[in-house]
Amino acid sequence: MIHIQVEDTDGSKRSLEIEENPSTSLMEVLTEEDFDVPAICGGMAGCGTCHIQVRKGLEKLPQPDDDEEFMLDSLPNLTPQSRLSCQLKLTPALDGLDVKILGDGVS
């Protein structure tokens, strides 16, 4: 199981326990759990509405690819810990992650 702490855009916090599934993204879980993640582009790294700040566990994640980097660079609230949740697959690397949803992309 993967354990993730999530702070929504309204400041509410929840702990999630998710089964490992490399074919599913963190964005998909966040939308299923009714977090404020519009996911307008459907997980193609094209809108930034699934923008998160990784507050704990960033060092365990794979580096962003060129598409994710391009989208992140266009976001107004970019932080050094910014990632797109659509690009993070449910692998053991996500266990212990603590994230804040920023979701400030094109909507």
Image: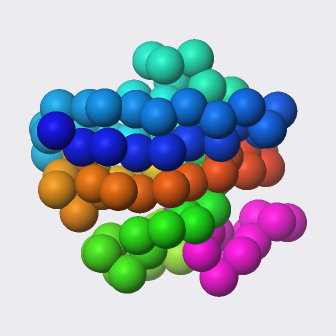
> Based on the displayed image, in which of its 4 quarters is residue 65 positioned?
bottom left
Please tell me which residue is depicted at 32% across the width and 72% down the height of the picture.
61
Looking at the image, how many numbered discs can be counted on the residues?
Answer: 0
| Region in magenta | 72-84
Q: Position of residue 11 (x, y in %)?
A: 79, 38
Q: Relative to residue 76, is residue 95 drawn left or right? A: left
Residue 45 seen by the camera: no
**Quarter of the figure with the N terminus:** top left
**Quarter of the figure with the C terminus:** top right
- Camera-side residue: 50 or 91? 91
* Magenta-drawn stretch contains 35: no
Residue 19 seen by the camera: yes
Please tell me which residue is depicted at 82% across the width and 33% down the height of the picture.
10
> Based on the displayed image, in which of its 4 quarters is residue 94 positioned?
bottom left
> Based on the displayed image, in which of its 4 quarters is residue 80 positioned?
bottom right
25 to 28, vertically: above or below: below
Please tell me which residue is depicted at 60% across the width and 75% down the height of the picture.
81
Please tell me which residue is depicted at 73% across the width and 32% down the height of the picture.
12
- Camera-side residue: 12 or 83? 12
Q: Main secondary structure of the magenta part?
A: loop
Q: Relative to residue 23, is residue 63 drawn left or right? A: right
Q: Position of residue 29 (x, y in %)?
A: 39, 29
65 to 2, vertically: above or below: below
Q: Relative to residue 15, is residue 48 drawn left or right? A: right
Q: Position of residue 24 (x, y in %)?
A: 24, 36
Q: Position of residue 20 (x, y in %)?
A: 14, 40
- Camera-side residue: 37 or 45? 37
98 to 90, vertically: above or below: below
